[in-house]
């Protein structure tokens, strides 16, 4: 039995394109004859059909290596080796211009010297990759091999009957710019004020916010309350831990669609602090989350305590006037001076949680702008996100700043 694992076609540099095509077609016909002969020798009676189609019908990448610049805990520069899932970056196949490319570029630091590629051809046409060193040399494509995409590559497709050929140019785009967050000062009138629901306030101390179909509030006796938007009454919401762990001051709530779990589902996060009078030495904030399935037949959602005190290393600090917002697929948090057992300076950094409230770290990308508010005796900053921009407003100065992460622009390049 004959097995072709890899094939290289060396073409004379003086061959013109017509002779090149004739040689390739001859090669395909020869391979077809060999396959037919092998089939006959093994006693197979199956008929073999060949087609004139020569096209790439799908193209994707496998797991790619990536080196990310980072800083150690003692301030030294380092490089962290990680991987990314190449199939998350869709490739467009233009069958008119015969170009293949990814519209959403791979992140900075991705190794494109060794790229695993998965492609399919119409009617089992043969794919051959043109060599970088020798344009007259073609190498048989195999998904087991990695390909150097530091420059555009040429892929030839040859129909199974040897009569059709197509030539594709493949571009694997990678960002050369590191993620950067830009701030600019705006007019005070431009701040997108977040409107709270207008509902009856009997027995309610504070409206916290809303999801797609629910409204949340803190009662006068510090219970977490819920009200359906199409309902008429407040009721005490369900908790998976003791209500003693609920925050009662510096409260902030964020809600967003959580399509990764299921359609028509909301992810809600509530942060805040317990009473300093009752818990004077506590160093961390209280973080709760609720996943709300809005299907009318789904069971009621339940608030889950995120266990901040169980591992203080990655807890959200206990800060005055906590504010949270969802931005760039993570939750951003800011706050004033530290309370109780926390001695943080006001607004000295921005915290981010990429696992939606479980762990919190000082962001290396998001930084506070040069706000005059930060020099006030008791600075206080509001924060809101419109999905595209992150907005800050100083309560004392009234100044407004608008921030944009450059990676959001990459999707539209």
Image: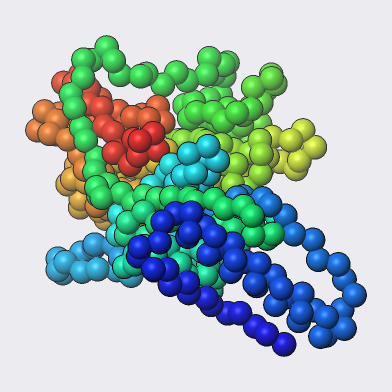
Residue 184 to residue 128: above or below: above
Q: Position of residue 407 (x, y in %)?
A: 33, 41
Q: Residue furthest right?
A: 45
Q: Nearer the viewer, residue 175 or 80?
A: 175
Picture residue at 45% right of the left edge, 35% below the top: 253
- Vertical relation: 273 (above or below) 409: below
Residue 117, image x and y in percent? 50, 63
- Residue 154 percent across, percent down from the top left: 43, 56
Left or right, 182 with respect to 239, comes to left
Residue 57 left/right relative to 408: right
Q: Is residue 224 visible?
A: no
**Against 316, is 62 above or below?**
below
Tell me if residue 78 can be seen.
yes
Would you identify the image quadrant in which residue 112 lies? Answer: bottom left
Give the camera-side residue of 173 and 190. 173
Q: Where is the C terminus found, in terms of image quarters?
A: top left
User: Left or right: where does residue 271 sit relative to residue 318?
Assistant: right
Residue in the foreground of this view, choosing between 172 and 132: 132
How many numbered marks, from 0 up? 0
Q: How is the image coloured?
A: rainbow
Establish if 252 lies above or below 287. Answer: above
Toward which corner of the image does residue 235 lie, by quadrant? top right
Spot the residue most to the top: 189
**Image quarter of the N terminus:** bottom right
Q: Looking at the image, which residue is at 70% across and 70% down? A: 32
Residue 128, given in percent of the width and then of the height, sits at 51, 64
Give the residue at x 70% y 21%: 231
Residue at 32%, 59% (x, y): give it. 150
């Amino acid at each position: 039995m004959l097995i072709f694992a890899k094939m290289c076609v060396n073409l004379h540099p003086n061959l013109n394109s017509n002779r090149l095509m004739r040689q390739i077609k001859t090669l395909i016909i020869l391979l077809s004859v060999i396959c037919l002969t092998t089939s006959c020798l093994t006693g197979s009676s199956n008929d073999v059909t060949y087609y004139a189609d020569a096209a790439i019908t799908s193209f994707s990448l496998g797991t790619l290596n990536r080196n990310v610049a980072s800083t150690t805990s003692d301030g030294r520069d380092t490089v962290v080796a990680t991987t990314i899932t190449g199939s998350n970056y869709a490739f467009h196949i233009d069958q008119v211009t015969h170009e293949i490319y990814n519209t959403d570029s791979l992140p900075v630091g991705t190794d494109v010297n060794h790229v695993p590629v998965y492609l399919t051809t119409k009617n089992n046409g043969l794919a051959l990759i043109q060599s970088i060193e020798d344009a007259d040399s073609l190498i048989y494509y195999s998904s087991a091999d990695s390909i150097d995409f530091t420059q555009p590559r040429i892929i030839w497709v040859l129909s199974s009957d040897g009569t059709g050929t197509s030539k594709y140019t493949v571009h694997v785009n990678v960002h050369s710019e590191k993620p950067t967050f830009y701030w600019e000062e705006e007019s005070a009138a431009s701040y997108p004020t977040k409107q709270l629901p207008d509902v009856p306030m009997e027995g309610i101390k504070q409206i916290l916010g809303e999801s797609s179909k629910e409204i949340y509030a803190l009662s006068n006796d510090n219970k977490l309350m819920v009200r359906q938007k199409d309902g008429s009454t407040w009721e005490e919401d369900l908790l998976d831990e003791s209500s003693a762990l609920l925050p009662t001051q510096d409260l902030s709530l964020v809600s967003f669609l959580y399509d990764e779990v299921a359609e028509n589902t909301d992810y809600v996060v509530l942060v805040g602090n317990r009473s300093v009078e009752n818990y004077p030495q506590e160093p961390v904030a209280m973080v709760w989350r609720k996943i709300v399935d809005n299907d009318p037949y789904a069971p009621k959602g339940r608030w889950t305590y995120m266990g901040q005190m169980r591992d203080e290393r990655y807890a959200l600090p206990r800060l005055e006037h906590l504010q949270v917002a969802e931005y760039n697929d993570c939750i951003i948090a800011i706050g004033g001076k530290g309370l109780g057992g926390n001695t943080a300076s006001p607004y000295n950094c921005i915290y981010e949680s990429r696992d939606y409230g479980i762990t919190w770290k000082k962001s290396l990308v998001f930084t506070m702008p040069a706000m005059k508010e930060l020099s006030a005796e008791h600075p206080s900053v509001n924060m809101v996100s419109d999905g595209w921009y992150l907005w800050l407003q100083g309560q004392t100065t009234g100044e407004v700043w608008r921030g944009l992460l450059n990676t959001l622009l990459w999707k539209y390049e």
